[in-house]
Image: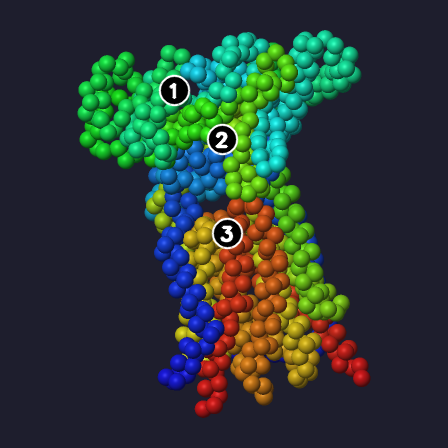
Amino acid sequence: MSEKERTQVLADRRIQTLIVLVVLSLLLAYTMGIKFGIEFEGGTRIPITLEKRVSQETMSEIVNIVKTRVSKFGLTQVVVRGVGETQIYVEVPKSDSSLVSEIERIVKKEGNYEGVVDGRLAVDGRDIIPGSIRPEGVQVSGSRVTWSIGFAINHEAAKKFSDVVFGKANYPVYMFLDRPEDSFVLISSERLRGNKSISDSDALDMARAAGVRDSDAIYILLLDNWEQEKAAIPNYNFTNNSKAIVSEDTPESVLNDLKAFNFTIVKKTPAEMTPEYNLAGERRFVEKWPAIGLLSAPVLSPGLTKGTAGQFYSINGPATGATQSEQILNAEKEMRDLKSILSGGALPVRVILGSSTTIPAPLGAEFLRYSIIGLACALFAVVILVVARYRHPKLILPIMLISLAELTILICIMGSVGTIDLSAIAGIMAAIGTSVDAQIIVTDELTKKGSQEGTRRKLEKAFSIITTNALVAICAVVPLLFSGLIETIGFATTLTLGYALGVFITRPAYGVIAGRILEGDEAK
Amino acid sequence: MELPNIYKIWDYRVLMAVPLALILISLYFIPQIPKGIDFKGGILITLQTNSSVDEEAIRSSLSGIGVKDVVLSSYTHPFGTTVEIEIEQNQFLAEAEKSRIPFSDRYDEVIDLEYQKTTMELEIEQNSSLASKYEARLKDVNAQLAQKREEMNAHALTILSNCGQVLGRQIDIQPGSTKELQDQVDKVYLEATETYNRRILGALSGSVQFSSYSFANVMPSLSEYFISKVFQIFVISTVLVVIVVFAVFRTFVPSLAVLSGAFADVLIAMGAMGLFGIPLTLSSFAALLMLVGFSLDTDMLLTMRVIKRREGTAKERAYEAMKTGITMSSATILSFSVLFALALITHISTYYQIAAVAICGLFGDIIATWFFNAVIVLWYAEKREKKP
């Protein structure tokens, strides 16, 4: 192409759109990184089968719970995804059998729920009658939105409960899930204040109050006075089994000091270490402190029981949120969370862990290498075929560039937003095929002899065929996309994306370039 | 190389014989399509080993624990040898698994009814005047409870007795609370599954030394789920495609021609699957759907060129379209052949299934479009041309 033609082409909007898209996708891939399936990265896939079919909503709930639990244990690169209605895959990039049993433990665990009132254990998870934990619904009265959840405890526990809560109206029930025993928290005063304008001594008092359960207390040690606290440690009843709950950003020197005492160090994120306070009512208390397993502290209102001998209890509270609809949503979430806590953090549905599949990383890398070579070969081969058929060697470059552009966009988008797994690669291969097919249609139309029509008209004809084709092909494949069949979603997505890209961006761009080349040739 | 214009050579209707024959042959082979593990259920064991593989030894050791239906394949790569063993599901475990979801459903119902019963009884204890008010409801709940509990226990017994068969001992329902029953059922089921897996591994380690293994277990509930999902997808796909094709062409005969061309193509591809033993799995099913798109590509090209264009005669337009169409198909066949070669090198079954179905389907498409669809379209177009 001559210099003039080249500038004309580059100025064309369609070409510019294509270039912009390629650059954007590369940027996307660069910032978000390209994710590969475990078939390429190597790793372990653990299938979790749910005991019963669940709705999409419950499925995403479960996926989130599993994700949170697994990542809490420091397993950061874990992918958890729902498969259909009854399965969840947990994928870890390492191939390690101890890791698998670790995940098994994490997923299956049913934690220990404890309700503590005024320093005494009021109710234990085992006392709750299964099936009795019921969200009682969201109530809207005027501008206030409240949620309420009820549960029942067995006969024997009821007596103990009523003893403990006697006279404690409007006291908080500290709801713990896996409350650590024989431990202390090492925290800075600033973090202990938790962004509230309260005094250090107030914060300390509330924190201490939350940590007492009969004879076991969770002590609070202040990082600010570490030297003094350190010296006072022998005065506590700590043992070799005592746990030090610290933040991840604790200085190394302090950690070494703790290790010298033989404490078990439990690290929590800064967010988990920060307590949340309820300063609204006449009673002020710590409402939430994930670092010690305190997940909620609703106010117990025994006056609202179901009118029976203290076996049925109801917990309620106000919902937060800016608008009423937001409050209602938050209320429902609060009820779900509480139900989960009362159930010992058990998943809404019982699960069975299937046996894991392992792909060794070197094997996966080999698969990837071959797949990429395969893609390149396919692209090369089809381009040669097109050029040989239409005998316009000048078309080699445009076809290659356009197909390459399309491939780049496809891979970048799939890799950063989705995952590149085996079925995605197969889909990309198919997309190469369809891309070239469409280019053939355009080239064919443009090289037709004996036609008096202008380039534009020819291109229009070609595009109408291409567009209709794409539409029908997408219709055939789209149901796969929404089916939830993980095995084939990569395939369906790349195909659909490929078709769509073709219709809107790459084909028109190719049409512009090819049109100019062939026009130029004809004119000579 | 110039292809002759087949439409001008003879009475082109004769060409129909080829696709019709192919379709008949395909219909014969379709029942022979092997079902992949996704739809058949079963256990797929993958072993990595660095030593040699004696297939006979593996088969006989598996047959020793009662596993007869074994599909074995092994392939070597730079890091050793991978052995894939596909066996059928243990019939007892399969029976037990089928009862798990019904058991769980009944369990939930029983727990709910028990709660209702306890609530009412407690309230009556406090306030005896409520006894008469609750009498009818209590009777009803008790009746339902008895029935649901019986059903639940029946399912529990199925699970326990089948698991017992695997574990080699008789297992009965242990007396206790409903929750304890659930715990027992879960524990026994897990034990039975793990025991059976260990048994398989034990048999295998006797005949091959492996460094790592993995199990993929497709239980009946999962394969049933896949089958019903796939059927659903197929129906929705078909409906969508039919609607769009009719919307584009707006005339009956050409739309029908295009659709029947696509349908014929899929049939021929499935016949090839039966003939060459390409298994029907989720991947090959996806490839069949993709074929619909490819097939419609060429069908549409043909139909639009012949019917909606005016230059030359219908036969000439059909011929030109055929040349373009065959180029398109060749290009796609070429790219899938590369995928196929890739599959042979890496032994990745996903690649193999998709590539094989695509290649067979594309060859079938050439026949279906240019020998079947073209005849119908040409007939229609020439009929229209004759009209004043």
Q: Residues within 10 Å of mark 1 (few under 14, many from 20)?
A: some
Label 1 residue SS: helix
**Label 1 vs label 3, nearer the camera:** 1
Q: Judge from the rendering whether residue B110 lies leftward or rightward of residue A412; answer left or right.
A: right
Mark nearer the N terminus (1 vs 3): 1
Q: Judge from the rendering whether residue A480 lies leftward or rightward of residue A256; answer left or right.
A: right
Give the x, y percent position of residue A39: 42, 46
Mark nearer the N terminus (1 vs 2): 1
Q: Residue at x 63, y 23 (%)?
A: B107
Give the residue type at disc 1: Ala
Q: CA distance from mark 1 to mark 2?
A: 40 Å
The chain under label 2 reads A
The chain under label 1 reads A
**Label 1 vs label 2, nearer the camera:** 1
Q: Residue at x 25, y 28 (%)?
A: A223
Give the residue type at disc 3: Gly
